[in-house]
């Protein structure tokens, strides 16, 4: 056996020791052998004087209060290999786990973000629709009112024109004027009622909308509250669990915290789902309404009113012509009066 | 010589060797081997243990032949330990001798 193999073998047996210690001992033995060889001893003999490597290693380990079987059983190579390989593999696994976790988290947050964006868009769309509805109603009302006043003016004109009429013709004209006036009044009444209806409907919708917002806000607040409670309970659960594992008598606390966490979490989920459900329901309702409900009714009303107004407009020129006729009819009367004079 | 005897007194002999003079490993082994016939390999672990227990200090000193040598020096704690071991040895040896003396009456 050469010096190198002897030292290598000895090192394998001493692998449990720190590297520095191993080096110290091996250096001593190496130097001892060197001196012996220098003094004219054969390398083989010098090594044989140490006795079996195993026994020597056992004695060395005994000096460190290490069980000799440990050094022999492990056989040097396994320990470092085990450590490095497992460490690397563990690191790789951890890194993989980290990336997957990160991806999942990112996806989750993206989902949340998407949901919020959707919700925001929905709310905005609802608001816009609501506002548009209200505005349209107002515009229509204004139009109606304008038309109504025009018709009223025309009627007043006709009235003024027809005030002097005394004969059948004038009476007829008066009748017509009256009809015109009534038509104008009717349209004005319609406008008023429509406006009132619109206002009532608008305020109703506004109140409804406010109620819905309140409802959602309430449930969202409840969600936040329950979520915070759940998180607090989770924190308490972890703390108490650690303390319990350190032999503190906290089984009750741990159970209470676990229960609180579960209850808070489920309550938060319930509240949140309730808001969403409500919102979806509202949207569906709104869609259904829009499809066949009051809005079309409203439009129908408006459409019904508009032609009437047009009718009035159509009537108005007639009245104007009547008003123009009226002076003509007056002329013969003045002529008659002059004749009487 | 009974190896168990050797094992018991080896520590005392090594301590005494280093007390007289700072020595390096091979020198020590030779010195100890003059007193008792011992496996050279067993002295190094003993030196290591005594160093770890702070009875020895080590330092390197250049040598005319080969690499620097590690010298062992007995610390104050080492001196106290050596004295207590020597006392124990004296007492032990006396007792054993006396016992053996007593045995002569039975002859």
Image (cartoon, coloured by chain):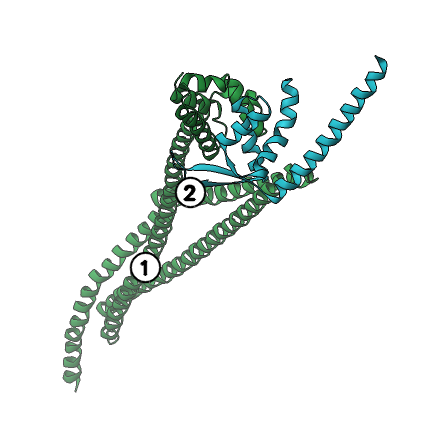
Chain colours: A green, B cyan
Q: Quadrant of residue B62?
A: top left
Q: State the CA–CA distance, disc 1 to disc 2.
A: 25 Å
Mark 2 sits on what residue?
A280
Q: Position of residue A329 (x, y in %)?
A: 16, 73
**A298 relative to A338 in the view: left or right:** right
Q: Residues within 10 Å of mark 1 (few under 14, many from 20)?
A: few
- Residue shown at the point (82%, 16%) measured from the top left: B104
Q: Would you say A82 lies left or right of B11 here? A: left
Q: Quadrant of residue A95?
A: top left
Quarter placement of the C terminus of chain A: bottom left
Residue B33 place in picture, x, y as percent:
55, 25
Mark 1 = which residue?
A135
Instruction: Give the left or right position of residue B30, taking residue B62 as reference.
Output: right
Q: Is residue B59 above or below residue A40?
A: below
- Relative to the observer, which residue lies in front, A11 or A97? A11
Chain ID for label 1?
A: A
Residue lying farthest to the right in this orientation:
B105
Q: Which image quadrant: the N terminus of chain A?
A: top left
Residue B82 position (above or below residue A72): below
**Residue B39 makes an appearance in the image:** yes
């Amino acid at each position: 056996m050469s010096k190198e193999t002897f030292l290598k073998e000895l090192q394998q047996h001493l692998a449990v020791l720190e590297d520095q210690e191993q080096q110290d001992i091996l250096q001593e033995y190496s130097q001892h052998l060197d001196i012996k060889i220098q003094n004219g001893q054969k390398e083989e003999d010098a090594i044989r004087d140490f006795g079996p490597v195993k026994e020597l290693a056992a004695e060395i380990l005994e000096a460190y209060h290490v069980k000799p079987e440990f050094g022999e059983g492990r056989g040097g190579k396994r320990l470092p290999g085990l450590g490095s390989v497992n460490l690397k593999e563990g690191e790789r696994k951890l890194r993989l786990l980290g990336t997957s976790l990160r991806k999942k988290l990112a996806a989750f947050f993206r989902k949340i973000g998407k949901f919020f964006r959707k919700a925001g868009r929905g709310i905005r769309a609802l608001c816009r629709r609501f506002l548009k509805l209200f505005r349209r109603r107002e515009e229509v009302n204004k139009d109606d009112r304008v038309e109504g006043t025009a018709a009223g003016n025309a009627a007043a004109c006709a009235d003024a024109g027809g005030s002097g009429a005394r004969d059948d013709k004038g009476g007829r004209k008066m009748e017509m004027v009256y009809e015109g006036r009534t038509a104008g009044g009717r349209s004005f009444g319609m406008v008023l009622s429509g406006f009132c209806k619109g206002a009532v409907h608008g305020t109703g919708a506004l109140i409804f909308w406010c109620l819905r917002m309140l409802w959602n806000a309430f449930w969202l607040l409840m969600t936040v509250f329950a979520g915070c409670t759940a998180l607090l309970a989770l924190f308490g659960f972890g703390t108490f669990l650690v303390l319990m594992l350190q032999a503190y008598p906290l089984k009750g606390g741990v159970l209470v915290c676990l229960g609180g966490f579960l209850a808070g979490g489920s309550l938060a989920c319930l509240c949140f789902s309730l808001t969403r459900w409500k919102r979806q329901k509202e949207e569906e309702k709104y869609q259904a309404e829009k499809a066949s409900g009051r809005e079309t009714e409203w439009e129908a009303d408006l459409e019904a009113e508009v032609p009437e107004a047009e009718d009035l407009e159509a009537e108005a020129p007639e009245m104007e012509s009547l008003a123009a006729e009226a002076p003509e009819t007056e002329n013969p009367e003045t002529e008659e009066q002059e004749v009487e004079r | 010589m009974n190896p168990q005897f050797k094992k018991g007194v080896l520590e005392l002999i090594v301590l005494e060797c280093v007390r007289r003079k700072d020595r390096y490993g091979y020198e020590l082994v030779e010195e100890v081997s003059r007193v008792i016939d011992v496996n050279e390999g067993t002295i190094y672990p003993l030196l290591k243990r005594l160093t770890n227990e702070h009875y020895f200090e080590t330092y390197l000193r250049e040598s005319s032949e080969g690499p620097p040598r590690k010298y062992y020096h007995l610390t104050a704690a080492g001196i106290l330990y050596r004295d207590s071991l020597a006392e124990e040895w004296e007492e032990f040896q006396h007792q054993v001798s006396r016992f053996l003396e007593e045995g002569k009456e039975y002859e």
